[in-house]
Image (spheres, helix red, strand yellow):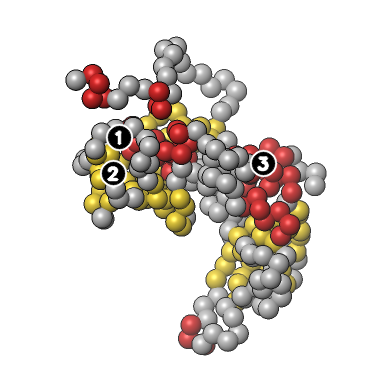
Amino acid sequence: MDRDREEVTEFLGQVSLLQCLPGSSIRRIAEAVQVRNYEPGDYVAREGEPVDGLYIILDGQAEVSAPANAEEANRPDYVLNKYDYFGYGTNSSVHQGTVVALSKLTCFILPNKYGHLLQPKTIWNAEETPEHSLLEQILHLEPLEVDIFRGFTLPEAPTFRRVFGGQFIGQALAAASKTVDCLKMVHSLHAIFLVAGDNDIPIIYQVHRARDGSSFATRKVEAKQKGLVLFTLIASFQKEEVGFEHQAAIMPDVPPPEQARIFLSFL
C-alpha cells in the first residue's frame, strides 16, 4: 500500500469503532489494511457470503440492503459514507445484507487474521501484560457502545468514601480522549462538580461530540449514576502542528498515587 502511513493513521483515528483503541493498535491497523476500489453498481458484499474482514469507507458511497428474509415493511435501505464501516466479524460470520457501490468507492479492509487488533487488553494497552499500573487500572473504562463508557472505583485505589475530584476528571477525560483522533492531544478542559458519587456503583460516562475539525475537536462528557448527572467536563483537543507553542510550567516531583499519603493522615 503506497499511501502515507501517517495519513492512513489519521484517517482511521476518525472512525468511531477504532477511537477507543490504544494508539499503538491504530498504527498497527494502518499497516495491515488493504485498499480496494469499486465502480458504481459493483457488489462490495453479498448477503450470506462469509465476512472476510472489516470494511471502512475511505471515499464514495455504498448502499446496504436489508436481509431478504426481513418483512417488506421492515427492510429500509441505508447509505454508507466516509468513515462508516461494516463486516466486523470472524471467519464464521456472514454478511447480513448486500452492499452495492453507489459511486466510485474506495475501502480500507482489515482482513480477519488481524481481527485481534480490534480487541486490545485495555483501552490504553494492546499488549498481554500480566499487570498494569494502579493509575492505568483507575483510568480503564469499559466501552458499552459508541460514546458511552463505564468506569469503576477500585477497592485498592485511594478513596475518600465518596467519588469526586481527580477520579471524575481522569475518567471523564479518558472517555473523551477515546472518541477523538489519537493524533489530537488535549490542550484545555473545564470541569463542574455537581454531586459526589457512590464508590460502590459504576459510573456511566456519556460523551457528546460538540465539534470535529481538521485541527481541533471538542467533547462534552457527563458522568452519571442512577441516571443523575454528577459531573460534567468540556475538553478541547488539538493536533500538534509546526509552530504550535504554549506555556509549560515545570511540575514538581510527586509520588505515584499508590504511594501518596492518605488524606486522613493530614487531619
Q: Is residue 195 above or below residue 256?
A: below
Q: Which residue is mark 3?
A: 27
Q: Is residue 217 visible?
A: no
Q: Residue 25: which quarter of the image?
A: top right
N-terminal of the pair, mark 2 or mark 1, is 1
N-terminal of the pair, mark 3 or mark 1, is 3
Please state the horizontal and vertical placement of residue 28, each as a whole percent of the image.
69, 43
Contact? badges 3 and 2 (CB < 8 Å):
no
Which is more toward the observer, 17 or 139? 139
Contact? badges 3 and 1 (CB < 8 Å):
no
Tally the marks: 3
Residue 159 marker: 1
Contact? badges 2 and 1 (CB < 8 Å):
yes
The residue under the point 48% across, 36% down is 136
Report the mark closest to the observer, 3 or 2: 2
Crowding at dot 2, Cα within 10 Å, few <14 / some 14-19 / many 20+, comes out as: some
Crowding at dot 3, Cα within 10 Å, few <14 / some 14-19 / many 20+, comes out as: some
Q: Is residue 62 above or below residue 35?
A: below
Please state the horizontal and vertical placement of residue 186, each as a whole percent of the image.
46, 32
Q: Which residue is mark 2?
A: 199
Name which residue type carries label 1: Thr
